């Protein structure tokens, strides 16, 4: 196969570890005889369609650039929520994608994201197969703080978000316990359908914390009565109670506690309101305790972009996923996603593998029922064993005078494909 | 003066640096021939009155204990919002305090906190003076993330909170910019009357961030119309705008934007609601832009307890304040607070001094008008020069398997004074 260019794009929600995958991919690509230039599409699939394409190997020159980019949170190439339509409209889009890939002489297409992104790259790969195009590969690189991708032990981005959640909860617990009056801290954690990140709050106990006292995941039907009963019992035991709750908790009929009645987005996801404030209202109504201080806390986007608490294990694995995706692409593999398979908990060992995108796209891996305690308000030791290695290691982020230093691509340097034949 | 015991207590809101002051105080005390045991009152003045007193030098034995305590956020001895009443009721309380100090053979009383706490220790000191008691000193150790104490260049706790705010905003800015649609991120920062911490958001620019774009402090009368005008202008310039706003902003009549109508607490402070969500409502009403994503973010208590982003400069100065407070006490000084005087910006140099508590208690140091830009929505280069050294240096917190390790006193080991004569 003649030398071809490569393009990489990022999609879905931000993460602290996503750029480590680009670094891995670029590192492998610049060493490959088969690959010419390394392009990046700005703002995912939307950017590709808009020809918002920059030349990465011309913008990243120094070793320090790589070091900085690894520790830079949120998609350095931007993201997109664009979904390729189904049916004839979609076919026209796929034709357009092919035209652009040809125009830029691209033989390697890498898409870095979560479930929806894997669906997108899968559809691109299937389209290329149907057209019998064998000189362009399309490979997925996993990323999601939700940890809900199938066929991989865990996903890049999850470990760093988990470390942020556990550390912050350990700190919040100390803060919440300083006053003598009773208090309830309700920490709302991301995770619409899968409770992995909320479950990771349990690791605060490895900081010597008594928190979290109660953990509510979307996998368990939420009962307001049971919650009030469990919280009341905890407040009998101890003065300060910390509740970790997933934004996606819903009742036995599947109604989100934080349903705002908002419309769904292009991928069919609903905007959810504040679960923590909903629970605050509920406690005030149903559990009137004198001088009870209720503090709802939302980690907001810091839980996914708080790179200063990235897990070194996570960043290294994220790098490897990008590296191995390019490796697989060079070997002519297509329609696959790189996966991480754990071979041992202690010592923690993984090997990298591949899984067909057809099997992954749009399926969601939830927390298994046997890792949730019987009362539905906690997780088991098996979950702790699973989580521990993922948050391990401090990322060696670069600070200058106390402030983090990030790498930024220049998104305005849009290239002319004629210059890169 | 015969050997006497010492007691230290903490008060007010938590901070990441407050325990470094205890470490400094204990370090000096255990080396002093004049001081017997080092006691801690659990939950501030309230704990002293309740005789919830523990023996610190018996609980802290290893060097590692000190190392861990320095990096442990929030008062390790607990806090209190108790205020000693005025008038005859107050006199009775002061008599009771004296009785307890005698009972425990205490000659050195140290109180670590902000404005309200300095008022408390000042009143204790004045009571002792009136009674002509010259064998007990009462000394204040400054602490407040608000940085609003008079007669000190800055306060311990502020630098760490400032580093948390600036770093988190730099990360949030990257996160908020990944999607192509326009967005406004509104970050609400602590500071009821003084805007120092909100001003510190400007240091995100030292991370290469374009954020914050607009900064609103309580020192400037807030105008909704002007805000909408300034935000609208920014959104013409750039797609993603980040606003840093103090929880304490108020209009020209002094009405808090986030006034919940709640009653005031013992110190006359009002509970404020969410400024960020108030501004979100305002933008939706007055600045209808298609697909504008508005994200209100509250740093909540993490901005004061996020020890993983503590400033090393702050921790070292906090340690020194505790150390020098005990030094001053041993020298027989009373009714004073330790102050930090800056002698040079570059290189950053400070010297420690003392100021009479009478001058400090209940006064508040606000951001000077000349450090706020003319449009009222930013800060000047002088402010940046002032702030920079305070966030400098990474605290060497101890992580095990990625999670922070904290020191905890055993609050249940209440001592019997008869054992410590």
Image (cartoon, coloured by chain):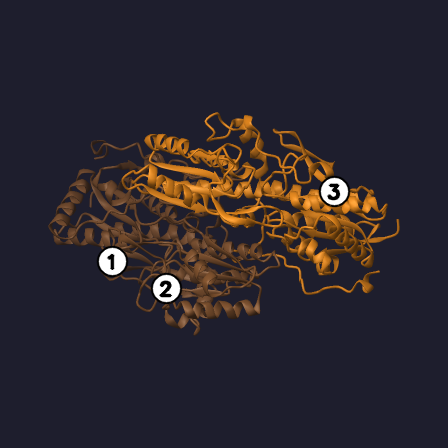
Chain colours: A orange, B brown
Q: Name the residue under label 2.
A: B218
Residue pointed to by mark 1: B357
Measuring from the top left, give residue A139's x and y in whole percent. 75, 44
Instruction: Report whether mark 1 lies on the same chain as mark 3.
Output: no
The residue lying toward the viewer, choosing from A43 and B408, is A43
Left-right relation of A194 to B262: right
Q: How crowded is mark 2: few (under 14 residues within 10 Å), some or many (20 or more)?
A: many
| Chain letter behind tag 2 | B
Above/below status of B289 relative to A20: below
- Bin the neighbour count of mark 1 within 10 Å (Cα to Cα): few under 14, some 14-19, many 20 and up: many
Residue B67 showing in the rendered view:
no
Across and down, in percent, residue A138 comes to 77, 46
What numbered label is drawn on residue A324? 3
CA–CA distance in space, label 1 to label 3: 64 Å
Q: What separation in Å lies between label 1 and label 2 (alpha carbons)?
A: 26 Å
Q: What element carries label 3?
A: helix
Residue in the picture at 16% in, 47% down: B94
Answer with left or right where residue B348 lies relative to residue A334.
left
Nearer-the-camera pick, B320 or A414: A414
Looking at the image, residue A53 lies above or below residue B48 = below
Chain to which the residue tagged by mark 1 belongs: B
Q: Residue furthest front?
A: A88
**Which of the 4 image quadrants contains residue B314?**
bottom left
Badges 1 and 3: C-beta atoms under 8 Å apart? Answer: no
Classify residue B41 by image quadrant. Answer: top left
Instruction: Report the chain holding disc 3.
Output: A
Task: Answer whether residue A220 is visible to the viewer in this image.
Answer: yes
Where is residue B416, by image quadrant? top left
Q: Position of residue A351 (x, y in %)?
A: 70, 34
Q: What element carries label 2?
A: loop
Kindly report which numbered mark, 2 or 3, lies closer to the viewer in this rendering: 2
């Amino acid at each position: 196969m003649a030398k071809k260019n490569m393009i990489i794009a990022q999609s879905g929600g931000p993460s602290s570890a996503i750029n480590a995958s680009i670094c891995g991919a670029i590192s492998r690509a610049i060493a490959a005889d088969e690959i010419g230039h390394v392009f990046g599409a700005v703002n995912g699939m939307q950017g590709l369609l808009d020809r918002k394409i920059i030349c990465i190997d011309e913008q990243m020159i120094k070793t320090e650039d790589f070091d900085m980019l690894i520790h830079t949170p949120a998609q350095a190439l931007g993201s997109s929520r664009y979904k390729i339509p189904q049916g004839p409209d979609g076919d026209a889009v796929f034709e357009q994608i092919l035209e652009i890939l040809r125009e830029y002489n691209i033989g390697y297409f890498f898409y870095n994201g979560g479930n929806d992104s894997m669906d997108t790259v899968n559809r691109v790969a299937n389209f290329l197969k149907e057209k019998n195009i064998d000189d362009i590969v399309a490979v997925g690189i996993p990323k999601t703080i939700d940890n809900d991708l199938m066929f991989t032990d865990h996903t890049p981005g999850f470990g760093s978000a988990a470390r942020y959640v556990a550390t912050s909860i350990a700190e919040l617990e100390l803060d919440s316990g300083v006053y003598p009056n009773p208090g309830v801290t309700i920490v709302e954690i991301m995770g619409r359908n899968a409770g992995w990140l909320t479950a990771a709050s349990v690791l605060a106990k490895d900081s010597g914390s008594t928190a979290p006292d109660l953990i509510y995941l979307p996998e368990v039907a939420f009962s307001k009565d049971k919650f009030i009963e469990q919280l009341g019992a905890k407040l009998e035991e101890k003065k300060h109670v910390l509740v970790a709750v997933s934004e996606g908790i819903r009742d036995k009929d599947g109604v989100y506690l934080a349903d705002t009645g908002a419309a769904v987005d292009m991928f069919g996801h609903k905007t959810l309101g504040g679960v923590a404030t909903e629970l605050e209202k509920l406690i005030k109504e149903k559990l009137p305790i004198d001088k009870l201080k209720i503090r709802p806390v939302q980690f907001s986007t810091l839980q996914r972009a708080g790179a200063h608490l990235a897990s070194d294990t996570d960043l290294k694995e994220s790098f490897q996923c990008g590296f191995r995706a390019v490796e697989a692409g060079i070997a002519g593999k297509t329609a696959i996603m790189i996966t991480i398979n754990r071979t041992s908990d202690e010592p923690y060992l993984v090997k990298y593998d591949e899984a067909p995108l057809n099997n992954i796209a749009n399926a969601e891996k939830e927390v298994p029922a046997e890792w949730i305690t019987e009362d539905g308000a906690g997780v088991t030791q098996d979950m702790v064993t699973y989580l521990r290695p993922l948050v391990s290691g401090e990322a060696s982020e670069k600070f200058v005078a106390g402030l983090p230093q990030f790498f930024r691509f220049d998104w305005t340097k849009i290239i002319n494909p004629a210059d890169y034949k």
